[in-house]
Structures are given as C-alpha cells and as structure tokens.
Amino acid sequence: MHKNELRISVNGQYDPTKGKEYNNDRVAIGWSLTNYTWTEDSVRKLTIHRGISCNEYPSGHRGKDDWVATHAIMLDFDGGTPSQHDLLEQQKTWNHDSYLYSSQNHQKAKKGIICDRLRVLIPLSEPITNERDRKAVDAYFCEKYPTIDKTFLDRHMYFAHGTTTVSSFQHSQGPFDWTQIPNLDDYRDKVVVSTWKKKEDQLVRLNNEVLDHEKRSLRIEQVVPGSPIFCPFCGQSDERGGDSHNAVIKINENNLPFLFCSSCKSRGNGHDGVYNFDDIDGIVYRLNLDDKLIFIDTLKSKYMGGCEEPGLTGFVCRELSGKEHVQQFCRAHKVPFPEVFPRARYELVFESDKRADFSQGFVNIYDAPEVLRNPVPKDWVQKRPEYIHRLIDHVFAHDSDIIDRFYNNLAWFVKTRQKMITSFLMQGVEGTGKGFLFTNVFQNIFGERFASQADQDAFGGQFNSFLTNNVLVLINEVSGNFTSSAGKNLSTIEKMKIAITDESIQIEGKNKDRYNGKNVCSFLFATNRRDGITLSDNDRRFNVAPRQEVRVDATKWWPEYEELVELVNAELQDFVWYLKTYPADSALIGKVIENAPKKVLQVMSKQNAELFFDAVKAGDIKWIMENLVQEKYGDFSAVNFAEIQRLARGLKSKDRVSVDTLRALYNNITGKELEPIKFGRIAAGFLEGESKPMKIDGKSSRGYMIDWDDFSLIDDE
C-alpha cells in the first residue's frame, strides 16, 4: 500500500446521527472497500462520520465467510486500560502510522463504570489475506495488550463512529508491516486453522487473478468466454506436468458462466473440472457480456435495470418497480433472471470511469465525456489554449492572482475528480461571458448532464437531489448575506453554504425518502449586481474576482459568436490535457484569496459601528476623516463641525485616545446620540476591554491605547 493511503471498508447505509443499535440492523450489507488519503483531516472525518470495518467483503455482506482480507487494524480498549495518558505515551514510541481517538462512550457511564474508552486505527502496508496470518496477528496483539477487546480483529467486526475528545494523529512512519512482527512464525505455529473445504464450495470470483495464454495477469471479469487461461485453482501448481493453459470460461444451459479446467478434471477436482461462479459474480459477469445491468440500489432499496435503448442517448439506468418488471426486462433483453440480485449504491462516482464496480459497491451515475477520459499523449507539448484563456481572463477581469488560483483549482479538480470545498464568484455586467464559459467549456468537459446552471432558488425548495447528480453547477444571479444565520433567506443561504463545503449531506428527492448521500457537487457563482452577496471577515468559501464592466463582445479579440464556439470546441481537448499536466498545488484547494474585491463585499456586511471601531483599532485616521458628517448630533450639537474635525486631526501620531473624544466622533459618524455610559459599554465590546485611567494632553482622563497613523495628508490647519 502507498505510504499515504488507507484502505478501509465503509457502509453507505450507516447513519452517524443515530446510535449503534439503530445502525447494527442496517449494516449487515452494503460494505465497499474505499481508499482514503492518510491525512489527519481525512482520517478524522472518516472516524467521526462513518461506520467502518478494517476487513474487505467483495459481496458487500459483512460476514465471516465473506471475509477475504484485512487492510487495517483497529485496537479497541473499552475497559479503561491502558489509560489515555499511557496509550498516548506508547503511541509516541511506535514506528508506524496510527490514529488514536475516543469512542462514543469515552468517559461516559456504562454499566456504572466511567473510564477511558479508546481506539487506535493502524494502516497495514499489505493486507492480511489468510486465516492463519489473521489469527497470528490477533494473538500477537492480544498478548501485547491483555486488556484489549478480544473481538478487535474478528472477520465480521465493524466499528461505529467515534469522537475527537481524544485525537492523536501520527503520519511520519508509514503503514504497519505486520510481516515483521517479532516471532511471527511462533504465533503462526500455535494457530489451528481448518484447511479442508468442500470442493463444491470453491467458487469463481470476479476479482480472482488468472493468467491468460501468454501468462499476462488479468482478473476473471476481464476474461472473454472461450479464451484460454490458466486455472485459478491449479494453473500454477507444482503438481501439473505441463506448462500451458488449461482452462476456459463457458456459459451453461441456464445462461450463466462457469469455469472448466481440463487438469482439474483429470485429477478429479471440482465437479469433473467444473467450478461455478459465486451467485452474485456470475450474474454480474453474464450481464456484462450483453452490456446490461440488474441490481438493487442499496441507498433507496429499489430494483434497477440498465441498458442502451433505441431513441435514447447513451446507457440508461432506471428504476424497475417490482420483480415483475425485472422479469420483463430480463426476457426483453434475453438475460438470466437473478436468483440473488447484485447490490450496490447507485450514485455518482466522479473519480471513476467505470460504469459499475460491485467489488467497490457502486453503480456509477456518472458518464465522463471522452475529452475528460482521454489520457495525455506522450508526445503532447503543453500549451495554454488561446481563446479559452482569453475568455477566462476576461470573465475574471484580468486579475492574475484570481486567474492563477482558478487554474490551480480547476486542474486539481480535473486530475483528482474530487469535490472543491471553495468557490469562485464572477462579477460583471451582462454579456461578460460567464454563461458562455460555462456552457461551451465546462459542460463539454464534464458532461452536459452533470454540469448545469441554476439560480439560488434551487436551494430554497424542499428537494436537493441535484447535489448528487451534478459535479459542477453555476449559480446565476446569486444574492444574499453569507455572513451569518440571520435574515429571511436563512434556509436558502445556509443550504448553499453547506453545499459548498460539506461532502456528506441529507438528500431528499421528490416522492423519495430522505437518506444520507454524498455531495459531489462543486460550485461557481455569478452575479451582475454590485451588491450580489455580502461576506464575513472570516469567510473561507469564496474567491472573489473583480467586477468586469466590459462586455466580452466589445473586446478587440472577439470574433463572431458562432466562430468563437468553433474555436473553443477545437481547443477543448488541449485545454483538458493542459489542466492534467498543470502543476496544481493541493495545499491551496481549501484556501481563498483575500483581495480588494472581496474586502468590498465584506465591508458591505458591516454596520457603521463595526466599521468605526475597526478604524479605531487600526489607527486609521483617514477613514475617520473621510466619514465625518457635517451636521450636529445629540449632546454635541453645540460642538460645530470644525471642532469635530479638530478632535480627529488631534489624534495624529498619538498613542492613545479619550473615551469622550471617541464618543464625539462616533456620534457624528453614526448619527447616534449615545450617553457616556451606553457608549462605554459598546466601546468595551468592540475594543475588547474597559477604558483605563491615563494622561491625555496633560489631563487625567479615561481612554484607550491606540497607535494612531501619522497621516501626512491631514491638513494641520
């Protein structure tokens, strides 16, 4: 396994908002082996949001007899020993990666006992694939930790989500090499494993590795019926006298596959050399021959059928309402009716070009266009396409920082096919090319069915299933306050904020049950308004481009519309290859640029009071001077404007200010009539503390220490 990778089984039906009793009834099936990067953020999210198993179950069923491998180890300590302190100290001495975290019952009363309840997730450098090794490793850890839960390495074991009350991540050592356990052979010798198995139980699996007639390795699912192969049971056995292929896959009278081996027949193995496929794998193999699919969607518990149909574009997968319709589907397409149905999540798996992978537990909604799938030719010379770049440069108002970040994030998006958790806001008058860029570039790259335009009303409705069926969405004419949970459009804005950042969300479609789904959708936003959205100072979602005031058809390089469409289409493949070879920095994916256009949107979210005190804390006399109002307010009505100006100018180069001066300036700028006591409370809140006694201009007063600007442009008159 790669040093920075973790392979572990997850269950799409697991609900992290519910307890273990609820989930135990729902996670017997639906398991799929998944790759995660070994980073703290990735592993923390995995362990607190998912039900996980360290074991691999190709059938998706979590049972002892379905186990084929263990890819990680989860040490489970429920009895209080080792304690949190002791285990953390031990972790520091280990020469392998690990993640130590707390279970749901950590320091909670359980049968009257309150104690540390901890787990340690340890990735393995290579999987454990046989029962003798599994039991040997189990015995090693049980001897090392006598208080460990003895079921920690059981073949059917899974672990509910934990917490981050205790959270210690180690990543510099690499995965644990269990083959180097001291005295491993001694542990193996003590293991008693039954090796006898009925011959009729030897089943062919799609992921069985075999050699073709030229001794090239491939999986059973890749073998065409009638093609000569080496038998997966005896093909490389020392008992064989010859060294040639000896097996073939055939189709029986029930229209299902089986494997026949002439060598096994001569030695009386199998059933006269015949080996049947696993029930699920057999029907999947047979359907693949005719480019058909029949399965149960485990997310919605519905029968599904897939095929190409006359009059429809591409492969179509749709719900079949009941077994009668499944039987009709099978008869119409001349494929066998399954005794046992394959089960998989019908979901959009953006990172995969496979239509289905039952070993990973999914049937893919996503159908990547060829322009995205095509690999970069070895002799291709990288260059940035001219007209697509001109379009991007114009839409993002020629801001090099924003454009560079856009290329970086888009390249990462194309190469990894993972959800972007930040977005870009494009601003400008109508006709700047925002829609043209999306329609003629992004929809063609990612697929028209999977890249759509919408307005923010799509988030305001009850149904949000579009988040699981699109990989990229342009939200046109966005408007709203993204600074807080306040306002009448709370539900819409909050849903948008969640959709930008969260990968796991509650999905609800029309006339469909709600379920936990994977949000694969990334977003771009566009507005023609100057005040489309307001942002908080700590916004971590938006990269904001400057406002573009020039229509794209008014530029010097603009050809006719239809000509530009043709020019852009001709550049699409080169553009994708350019992105695939672009040196994208993944560290920038979760970060946003703090630039002047963004500050404008952040300032719009502030009230005058907040802006005033921001200027005070920054010692910004210029802002105060520019915002003085030439009128009389409150108890300073007797103070003319010249006096207010004098107070402001008098701050220059000082390191303090009196509360009375601040109140006078505040009342003038905000139009308030605050009395000393009320103003003092407000100032204490914004300036993070009460005023203090101090000398100002030789007089005793109460005030604040402020490092005021020496603003040279202020007239001293």
Image: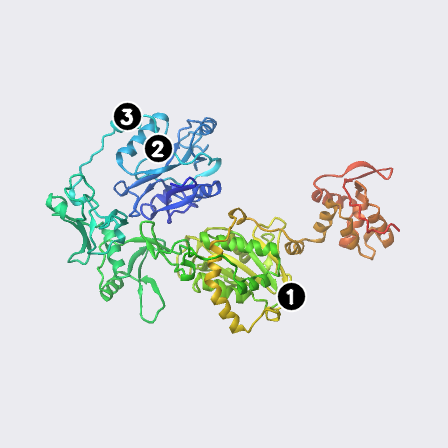
Which residue is under mark 1? Answer: 549
Q: Earlier in the sequence, mark 2 or mark 1?
A: 2
The circle drawn on residue 709 is none
Q: Marks 3/2: CA distance? A: 14 Å
- Residue type beneath disc 3: Asp
- Residue 530: give x, y in percent of width and height: 64, 62
- Circles 3, 2 touching at the beta carbon (< 8 Å): no
The circle drawn on residue 186 is 3
Determine crowd level at label 2: few under 14, some 14-19, many 20+ residues with C-alpha closer than 10 A. Answer: some
Instruction: Let me know if residue 478 appears in the view.
Output: no
The circle drawn on residue 178 is 2
- Residue type beneath disc 2: Trp
Q: Earlier in the sequence, mark 3 or mark 2?
A: 2
Q: Marks 2/1: CA distance? A: 63 Å
- Circles 1, 3 touching at the beta carbon (< 8 Å): no
Determine crowd level at label 3: few under 14, some 14-19, many 20+ residues with C-alpha closer than 10 A. Answer: few
Q: Is residue 300 above or below residue 39?
A: below
- Residue type beneath disc 1: Glu
- Residue 432: give x, y in percent of width and height: 59, 67
Instruction: Let me know if residue 376 appears in the view.
Output: yes
User: Does residue 594 appear to the left or right of 141 in the view shown?
Assistant: right
Determine crowd level at label 1: few under 14, some 14-19, many 20+ residues with C-alpha closer than 10 A. Answer: some
